[in-house]
Image (cartoon, rainbow, N blue to C red):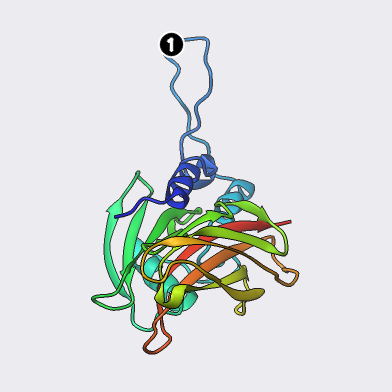
């Protein structure tokens, strides 16, 4: 499995996500060697901050997932719009996070979906995704994004074409859509810019995906969480 800078960035950010908002342990300095760390109850502010790091499901919706594979399936079907996604097993990372692979078909390329338990109900959320054939160097995870968005990375796809979208939370249609061109027979660099309309939410995602040359269906995708402003 290829390791991209995006995946490393997401893993590093995941371990620092408002730990008390996720039911974590907060340590406090002590003048004695016997004083143990204490656990603080999550507050509504810390829970909201933690949920804001997730791409899917939307925090304002009633959709919640009790397992990491269910979250991945919902993300692949309802967010990436894969027609019949094949969900792999959950691979544990730390105590509250890990990754799940998804393919559009049994022989299709793999998209790795990064998932984490968040919120007071410990439901499962998607932080982002990394496609085997699309590596996004810019923007990085959780970057502040303004229009036009500058996109850069490497990819390999039929005729070099990778679809690009800027999406806002709680909105079905993308704020902006276009494409970038990387390698067609081997991985090559891409760069470009994508204008998008004013978002109504504070955060969203940059979505890069490759369509099937046969039927236009989504084969794989890289999804990076961004903030607007």
Quarter occupied by residue 34? top left
Q: Position of residue 178 (x, y in %)?
A: 60, 76
Q: Quadrant of residue 225?
A: bottom right
The image quarter containing residue 149 is bottom right
The answer to whether residue 86 is above or below residue 1 is: below
Q: Nearer the viewer, residue 161 or 225?
A: 161
Between 119 and 109, which is closer to the camera in this rendering?
A: 109
Q: Tell me the quadrant of the picture where the C terminus can be found.
A: bottom right
Q: Nearer the viewer, residue 202 or 18?
A: 202
Using the rendered image of the protein, determine whether residue 145 is visible from the camera's viewpoint.
yes
Q: Is residue 91 left or right of residue 215?
A: left
Could you say where residue 61 lies in the image, as x and y percent from the top left?
57, 71
In this picture, residue 125 sits left or right of residue 109: right
- SS type, badge 1: loop
Q: Which residue is mark 1?
A: 33
Q: Quadrant of the N terminus?
A: bottom left
Residue 226, image x and y in percent? Answer: 61, 57
Examine the rendered structure and indicate whether residue 95 appears above or below residue 125.
Answer: above
Q: Residue at x 60, y 79 (%)?
A: 172
In the depicted view, which residue is nearer to us: 22 or 38? 22
Number of callouts in the render? 1
Label 1 CA crowd tier, 10 Å (few <14, some 14–19, many 20+)? few
Q: Residue at x 55, y 50 (%)?
A: 50
Q: Position of residue 143 (x, y in %)?
A: 62, 51
Q: Residue furthest bottom?
A: 215
Q: Is residue 41 visible?
A: no
- Residue at image x 52%, y 10%? 31
């Amino acid at each position: 499995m290829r390791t991209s800078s995006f995946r490393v960035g997401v893993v590093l950010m995941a371990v620092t996500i408002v730990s008390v908002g996720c039911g974590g342990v907060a340590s406090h300095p002590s003048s004695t060697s016997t004083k143990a760390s204490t656990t603080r109850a999550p507050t509504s502010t810390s829970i909201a901050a933690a949920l804001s790091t997730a791409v899917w499901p939307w925090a304002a919706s009633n959709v919640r997932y009790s397992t990491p594979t269910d979250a991945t399936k919902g993300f692949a079907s309802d967010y990436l719009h894969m027609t019949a996604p094949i969900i792999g097993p959950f691979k544990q990372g730390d105590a509250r996070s890990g990754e799940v692979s998804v393919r559009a078909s049994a022989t299709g390329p793999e998209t790795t979906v990064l998932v984490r338990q968040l919120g007071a109900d410990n439901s499962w959320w998607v932080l982002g995704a990394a496609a085997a054939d699309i590596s996004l160097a810019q923007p990085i995870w959780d970057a502040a994004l303004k229009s036009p968005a500058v996109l850069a990375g490497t990819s390999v796809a039929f005729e070099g074409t990778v679809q690009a979208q800027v999406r806002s939370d709680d909105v079905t249609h993308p704020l902006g859509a276009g494409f970038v061109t990387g390698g067609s027979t081997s991985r090559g660099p891409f760069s470009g810019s994508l204008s998008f309309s004013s978002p109504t939410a504070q955060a969203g995602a940059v979505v890069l995906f490759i369509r099937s040359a046969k039927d236009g269906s989504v084969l794989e995708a890289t999804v990076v969480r961004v903030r607007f402003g």
